[in-house]
Structure formats: C-alpha cells, structure tokens
Image (cartoon, helix red, strand yellow):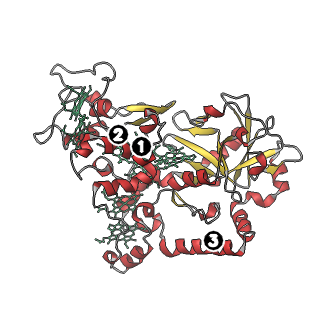
Amino acid sequence: MVLDALRTATVTSDPMSAEAVSAKDRSMHHAVEDSQRLVASLPPATQQAVAGWNQLISANFAGDQACAKCHEKEYEAHLRSGHSRTLTRIDESTLASKLAETRHYQDPRRDQIFEFSQNEGSLWVRDVANASGVAIPVTWLLGSGTHAQTPIAVDESTQSGVELRWSYFANRDQLGLTPDHERFDDFAAGTIECFGRPMDAADMRACLGCHSTLTPPPSLPLINSLVVANVGCERCHGPRKKHVALAHLGHAEEAKPMLRYETAEAYMDACSTCHRDESSVKPDATPNELVRFQPYGIKRSRCYLESPDKMTCSTCHDPHDTVSHNRAVSIDQCKQCHGNASSSECSHQPTGDCIDCHMPAVEWTSGIAFHDHWIRIPDEIPGETPSVDSAGNLTASDMLHSDGEE
Ligand code: HEC
Ligand code: HEC
Ligand code: HEC
Ligand code: HEC
Ligand code: HEC
Ligand code: HEC
Ligand code: HEC
C-alpha cells in the first residue's frame, strides 16, 4: 500500500510546523465536522443508511450512564473494568497531549524518529526522513492501559489504515514497540509500513468490533462517529432502552432480557466472540498466543469438562469488574470444588498457590503475561520450593502475594 492510500495531509511549507498541516485542510482536524463532511459527500442511498443506523442506535440503546441509578453496583464495578475504557478517541486521551509535549520518539529497532503534534484536538504523526511531507492523523487508542494502549489510524473514506508501530506501556510509563511489529523492522520508505502495520477494512472492523459495543456493518462506511465505543452494558445485555423506559414506570420485568445465560456453554459463547475459543485458533498458533484465549483454555480443562454446566467465567470472575489479583480469593475459588470429598485434592501441594502451578502466568510478548486458562497438570513445577513454616504450610506472604509480572 502506498502512502496515498491513507488519507494523509500533505505538508508543503515547513514540515515541522503544525500550522502547515492545518493550513492545507483545516476542517480535517475537527473530528465531528470531518465526519459530517464525509457523510454529506456520500451517495444518497448511503447517507440514508447512515441516518438509519443513527436512528437504530438512539431508538434502542440507552448507554451505560442510563443504568447507573438503578444498578449502582454493576455500574461502579464496570467503571473499574477495562471493558469500560477499551476504545478511546485520540482527541479524548491524555496520551495525545503528553506526546505532543514530548514531540519525538526514537524507534528502538529502526533508524527512525517519529514526530508528534496536536492540532485542534487531533494527534498527528510524521517521519520527516522516511516519508517527507506526510502527516498521519491518529484516530483511536485501543486498550484500557492495564497492559498497553495501541493507536490506530482509520481512513474514514477508504476504511483501511494502519496500526501504529508504537504503543504506550503502562508498566514502564513509556512508548515501546507495538507487540508483533518486529516483522516490520525492514520496511520500504515512502510506504505505509513506515508508520506501522497496514490494515484493510476487514482488519479495522475486527479491531474496533472487539473493543466496542457497536461497529457499523460492512454495508456502511467506517465513520468514527458511527462507532459506539467500549464494551458497554448493552454489548452483553443487548439494547436496553425499552427496559429503562419500562423500569422508570415500575415495569422492568416486562422488558425481556436480550441474553439468557442458561448453560455454561451459552454463557461462554457470549464472551468468546472477543475472548476467543477453539473456533478462533489458527493452525500455526503458538502456545504463548493461546494463553490469551481464556474460553479456549477453560473448555479444554477437565474442571469444565467433568463438572457439567457448572463452570463459567463467573465461577471465578465478576464479569462486571476488573480481575482480582488477590491469590487467597483465587485459591478459595479452586477449593469450591477441590479439597473436599466430592472432588480430588491436590496430591502434590494441596496448600500451595494453585494458580502458580496450574494456571501459570505465561509471557505473551515482552513484559506482558497472561494466565493460562487451560487448567492442567504442569509439565514442570515452576520456581524453587516456596517458603514453608515449621508445620509445612506456605507462609502468609506467599499465599497472599499479588501478581508481580503484570
Ligand atoms: C429505573 C430503574 C432501572 C434502570 C434505569 C435500569 N434497570 Fe435494569 N432492572 C431494573 C429492575 C427493577 C430489574 C429487576 C427486574 C426483574 O426482576 O425482572 C432490572 C433487571 C435488570 C437485569 C437482569 C434481568 C434482565 O431483565 O435481564 C439486567 C441485565 C438489567 N436490568 C440491565 C440494565 C441495563 C444494562 C440498564 C441500562 C441500559 C438498566 N438495566 C437500567 C431497573 C432498572
Ligand atoms: C465486545 C468484546 C468483548 C466481549 C463480548 C467480552 N469481552 Fe471481556 N474484554 C474485552 C476487551 C477488549 C478487554 C480488554 C479491556 C482492556 O482494554 O483492558 C476485556 C477484558 C476483560 C476482563 C479483564 C478486565 C479487567 O479490567 O481486569 C475480564 C475479566 C473479561 N474481559 C471478562 C469477560 C467475560 C466474562 C465476558 C463474557 C460474559 C466478556 N469479557 C465479554 C472484550 C470483550
Ligand atoms: C477477537 C477480538 C479482538 C480483536 C480482533 C482485537 N482485540 Fe484487542 N483485545 C481483545 C481482548 C479480549 C482483550 C483482553 C484480553 C487480552 O488481552 O487478550 C484485548 C486486549 C487488547 C489490548 C490490551 C489492553 C490492556 O491494557 O490490557 C490492546 C492494546 C489491544 N487489545 C489492541 C488491539 C488492536 C490494536 C487490535 C486491532 C489491530 C485489536 N486489539 C484487535 C480482543 C480483540
Ligand atoms: C462483559 C459482559 C457484561 C457487561 C459489559 C455487563 N454485564 Fe451485566 N451481566 C453479565 C453476565 C454474564 C451476567 C450474569 C451474572 C453472572 O452469571 O455472573 C450479568 C448480570 C447482570 C445483572 C443481574 C445481576 C443479578 O444479580 O442478577 C445486572 C442488573 C447487570 N448485569 C447489569 C449490568 C450493567 C448496568 C452493566 C453496565 C454498567 C453491565 N451489566 C455490563 C455480563 C455483563
Ligand atoms: C466447578 C468445579 C471446579 C472448580 C471451580 C475447579 N475445578 Fe479443577 N477440576 C474439577 C473437576 C470435576 C476435575 C476432574 C476430576 C477431578 O480431578 O476431580 C478437575 C480437575 C482438575 C485438575 C486435574 C487436571 C488434569 O488434567 O488431570 C487440576 C490440576 C485442577 N482441577 C485444578 C484446579 C484449580 C487450580 C482450580 C482453581 C483455579 C480449579 N481446579 C477449579 C472441578 C473444578
Ligand atoms: C477457575 C477459575 C477461573 C475461571 C473459570 C476463569 N478465570 Fe480468568 N483468571 C483466573 C485467575 C486465577 C486469573 C489471574 C488472577 C491474578 O492475576 O492473580 C485470571 C485472569 C483473567 C484475565 C486477566 C488476564 C490474565 O490472563 O491474567 C482475564 C481477561 C480473564 N481471566 C478472563 C476470563 C474469561 C473470559 C473466562 C471465561 C472464559 C475466565 N477468565 C474464566 C481464574 C479463572
Ligand atoms: C507446587 C506446584 C503445585 C501447587 C502449588 C498445587 N499443585 Fe495441584 N498438582 C501439582 C502437580 C505436580 C500435580 C500432579 C501430581 C501427580 O501426578 O502426582 C497436581 C495435581 C493436582 C490435581 C489432580 C489430582 C491429583 O492429585 O493428582 C488437582 C485437582 C490439583 N492438583 C489441584 C490443586 C489445587 C486446588 C491447588 C491449590 C490449593 C494445587 N493443586 C496446588 C502441582 C501443584
């Protein structure tokens, strides 16, 4: 893909000055105006479809805020969860202004310096040496930042774009190489690879689809304002506007729930569209990639297979809340089924930290680890022997340690 394929600003005068970009096409920097202008330029039938989409959203979706008053507990928990912050418009992020202040970022693996500037809310990236005269407007930040945030630039008119080469890493509080971008270390100057991984419209939709409540279908253009960002209440519970209206009249029960999690499998299917089960596993997937696929792991575990319809994600997690790193709580969850007469106890270390041995944290990419949800007998027993007191029990500090690697 050549650079022209992404709608970029051509910089004519001083390439370093943000003014140069804005002088070229001032309206480009204003996200809302920009979307409106784009819609106005579409064929009438598409304009109608866009209006229909907006109508569908406002008629059926209430938004998270509408649930806060009556479901305070779920609402508060959801605010703590990455689900509520997993897709941020760049113009609403604090990272954008931070980067505009820092101005430069030296790529750790390429002889390349990216330059940032902020203009009317948008964050622009350029690389004067390798793609002179071109500035790319970053559109979205993906990820809450629990581990990382990765920026993408979506071209609303072609619907293709780029996943940028740099991401923000919370544990180091700095930019670094976006995971898996080593394969673009060699790049052709003057192509979109200069900025990162080229993505076609399908890649874009997949990316936004798993990080949002609603993404427009392929029949509609991928205009930013048509995306309902973050994994909101209504992604899992379905459109609830009618429920809200009825509940205000005291008839909440008259609005049928959109989803009923009647079986453990149906429950996990609702998570698997994003968290991924066996149907998403590519033949060349490595074990380190598969640790990110929690439903895949659980469904292979004997715990799940041999306790029919008992084990779902909710056995161990509140789907509304952020993951607890309190090991005492996790161990208690295993003991719901293990450590009594109805099921087997661990013959190896029944009082140890079950998670360290049976759901170990596996490094997926440098510095970021996921817990393997395929619960099984470990090939090797990790680490050295944990500290035990004179009675042979693990000491409290071992039992309660929080997760160092995350
Ligand atoms: C005015 C108060 C009110 C508001 C606002 C409200 N709810 Fe409810 N909700 C209720 C009541 C009351 C029940 C219990 C109804 C029952 O027992 O069937 C309920 C039940 C539920 C349930 C469980 C059973 C079911 O019907 O699915 C879910 C899920 C739910 N609400 C989600 C939401 C979401 C999501 C929102 C925001 C979009 C929301 N509610 C807004 C009052 C409200
Ligand atoms: C629309 C896609 C989608 C669906 C459906 C979905 N998730 Fe997620 N989930 C995500 C994304 C994306 C993240 C990462 C959020 C972030 O940026 O930190 C996530 C994160 C999580 C986390 C970690 C949250 C934290 O802050 O520690 C848990 C737990 C989780 N999901 C459980 C579930 C469960 C259980 C279900 C099914 C009931 C489910 N998810 C359905 C996309 C989804
Ligand atoms: C199949 C659904 C799916 C697709 C497609 C997808 N993601 Fe995610 N993403 C998730 C889920 C689920 C999580 C949370 C658990 C995990 O990290 O595996 C997540 C986590 C993340 C995180 C880390 C959040 C954090 O701080 O923990 C980033 C960053 C991210 N995704 C970026 C992207 C980008 C960029 C794309 C597109 C190129 C993309 N994702 C495509 C489902 C998806
Ligand atoms: C990731 C998917 C997901 C999201 C996002 C989500 N929920 Fe839920 N919710 C569930 C699941 C799954 C259940 C079923 C309870 C269980 O099995 O733990 C549930 C149950 C509920 C219930 C019934 C609780 C009960 O005790 O019966 C209410 C009310 C509710 N959710 C409200 C909300 C509200 C309000 C939001 C947004 C602030 C929200 N949910 C966001 C997945 C989700
Ligand atoms: C819903 C009940 C349930 C929960 C919760 C549960 N398990 Fe299991 N687990 C089982 C059953 C049933 C089996 C298979 C029969 C047996 O060994 O008792 C099993 C088997 C196992 C095995 C043997 C696996 C193999 O491949 O031979 C291990 C190890 C294990 N569980 C560890 C754990 C750990 C660690 C946790 C907590 C993170 C946990 N389990 C939570 C029910 C459960
Ligand atoms: C038997 C208990 C158990 C079940 C069932 C379970 N998890 Fe987990 N999960 C854990 C534990 C333990 C951790 C690590 C907690 C810590 O950091 O100490 C974890 C961590 C996570 C994380 C954070 C990323 C990571 O790997 O550390 C996500 C996201 C997640 N689980 C999603 C899910 C989803 C989705 C399901 C259902 C398919 C699920 N989990 C089912 C026990 C469970
Ligand atoms: C130091 C590592 C370690 C810790 C900690 C540990 N296990 Fe195990 N566990 C093993 C090994 C190794 C085996 C296989 C033993 C064998 O084959 O003789 C095993 C076996 C099991 C089994 C299969 C039944 C059996 O006895 O063969 C279950 C169930 C189990 N563990 C559950 C747990 C639970 C629950 C915890 C936490 C309370 C836990 N384990 C803590 C290493 C560990």
The x, y position of residue 128, in whole percent, is 80, 38
Pointer 3: residues within 10 angstroms few (<14), some, or many (20+)?
many
Ligand 2 within 8 angstroms of badge 3 C-beta: no
Q: Position of residue 219 (x, y in %)?
A: 61, 66
User: Nearest the camera: 237 or 104?
Assistant: 237
The quarter of the displayed image where residue 216 is located: bottom right
* Residue occupied by mark 2: 373
Residue 182 left/right relative to 9: left
The kind of residue tagged 1 is Phe
CB at mark 1 closer than 8 A to ligand 3?
Answer: yes
Report which residue position mark 1 lands on: 293
Q: Amino acid at mark 2?
A: His
First in residue order: circle 2 vs circle 3 = 3
Element class at badge 1: loop
Give coordinates of residue 168: x percent, y percent: 58, 39
Residue 187: quarter of image: top right
Q: Which residue lies at the image location 60% right of the left edge and 64% below the top edge?
A: 226
**Mark 2 near ligand 6 (CB under 8 Å)?**
yes
Q: Amino acid at mark 3?
A: Val
Residue 188 vertical position relative to residue 389 in the rendered view, above or below: below
Identify the mark at residue 50; answer none if there is no mark: 3
**Helix, strand or loop at mark 3:** helix
